[in-house]
Image (spheres, grey):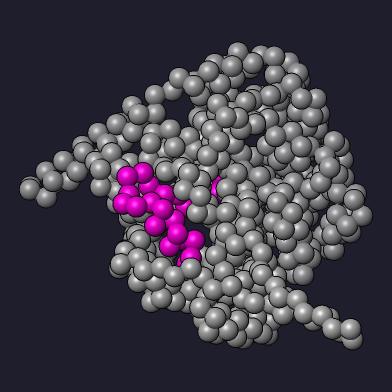
Amino acid sequence: MKKQLTKRLVGLLLSSAMVLSLTACGSKPASVSETPTTVSESTEEASVVEETPEEPEYDFGGRVVRIGSYYDMTPDPNKNAIEAALAERIAYVEKTYNCKIEFVDLGGNYVDQYVTSVLAGDPVCDIGYAVTTKVLPSLIEGGIAYPVSDLGVMDFSDYKWRSDVVDAGFYKGKNYTFLLKDPEIRYGIFWNKTLFDKYGLPNLYDLYKNGEWTWDKFKEVAIQGNQDTDSDGNIDIYGFNARENLGWCYLYSNDAYVAEKTDAGMKIDLSDPKVVEALTAMQDFTTNVKFRDAIDWSTEGWDSFIKDFRDGKYMMCLEEFWISYAYLNKEGEAMTDDWGWVPFPKGTSATDWSCYGKENGCRFMLNGIENPEEVATIYNLITDIADTQDEWDDLLEDQLESWADDAETVENVSYIYNNGIAVINSVNGFSELNTAINDMVSEIAKGESTPQTALDKYQSLIDAAISDLETHDYDADMQEIVKAAEEAEAAEGEEKSE
């Protein structure tokens, strides 16, 4: 599906909106929840006149806000409408409020630089970028990430923020992570519409819309999708592949979230009947369906399942949505067959669709920076790129349409992020706990134990990992990073001297 005309129209509308915004001294801050109105009435008619509120006047005295990552994240106006609006908004804020935004390329050891610089008392940047599972718990417990909610500047309920990323960095009653909302949701089912038509498989959009996209139907379609095209007794086209996280998708699709954030940290509950129900359904699938879930590292790379789905060797693929633009619609390497996207099938006890994420990129503020409230205010200002949620949705739709292959994908993905359904795994960053649960799920998937037997067997390991949440020495972890960085620097110096 080509959207060039749509994108041009959105671009024209966006340009007009930004001109009007600049004339009116910019868009409203995220903390402003209502637009004041003046109402005048006569006996014949009533009219409502909306007054656009002016932004507060700031002079940041030339303050430079440094935003660091493993590459230069300077917005590219030619990339999409969101980045164009962000680039224009940054230029406006810099000029109007006497400040400067610098995007810093920290290279591949960017997280180590956050740690070493903060502990040395000289943060390498003001705002950093990392995956959520690195921030929680390591950078939070290690004192590297700043509790931005303490500042009272950012309204994290505002439509511009990704709710799943905000929730992923909520820990012990404080918010640490944030990210502008975008359509890059996490796991769902990509399906090859061309192959489905060729081999007479049911249309997944019809199943989804009719509420028939269930675990049982998923199993049925996956079996039906296996094709021996040359009748040699071997499967040539698999109905399904799952590179990772199939078990977690079963749990989340049944509203079995396992972990709950508390003021003390984290509470793990595996006693919910939804957990056993989800793991039983997963085991039924993994032990009765021939599908690919293990990469052959001797002949395949980490992305081989993605590429093979793109090349028509799989009917369905469990993946994160970023593969849409990175592989399926990539210029010069795009998938030739038509493809679509639906959420993971709904569990028996679920109330809505799900979208599981093991992690996501996020931004956070570094501890020890000068005047963090000022930094938060400037970042809040540069991210006010739309005056209303409708305008923001238009920006998201423009970006999503360039990634999607059909209108149904746009609609389905929009439903996920508009309804706050995407959820990021709360335990993934706690390595011992995550390992214990994953080992248990793997044993169940292989059919080596029933779900309840495995839960009983692994409970002691899980309990020990939970205890580690309270006793783990994250300060020691941070010092190990500093030590490793010093050793690497010393080794590099020796090489240069030779």
Identify the residue shown where x is 78% and y is 37%: 254
Q: Quadrant of residue 44?
A: bottom right
Q: How many numbered discs?
A: 0
Identify the residue shown where x is 29% and y is 48%: 123
Identify the residue shown where x is 80% and y is 25%: 273
Q: Which residues are magenta?
A: 357-382
- In-front residue for pair 116/30: 30
Going by the image, does 193 lie left or right of 456?
A: right
Identify the residue shown where x is 62% and y is 71%: 387
Q: Residue furthest front?
A: 43
Is the N terminus in the top left, top right, bottom left or bottom right quadrant?
bottom right
The spot of residue 65 in percent (x, y) is 35, 61
Going by the image, does 371 lie left or right of 357?
A: left
Going by the image, does 115 lie left or right of 431?
A: left
Q: Is 365 within the magenta?
A: yes
Q: Is residue 306 visible?
A: no
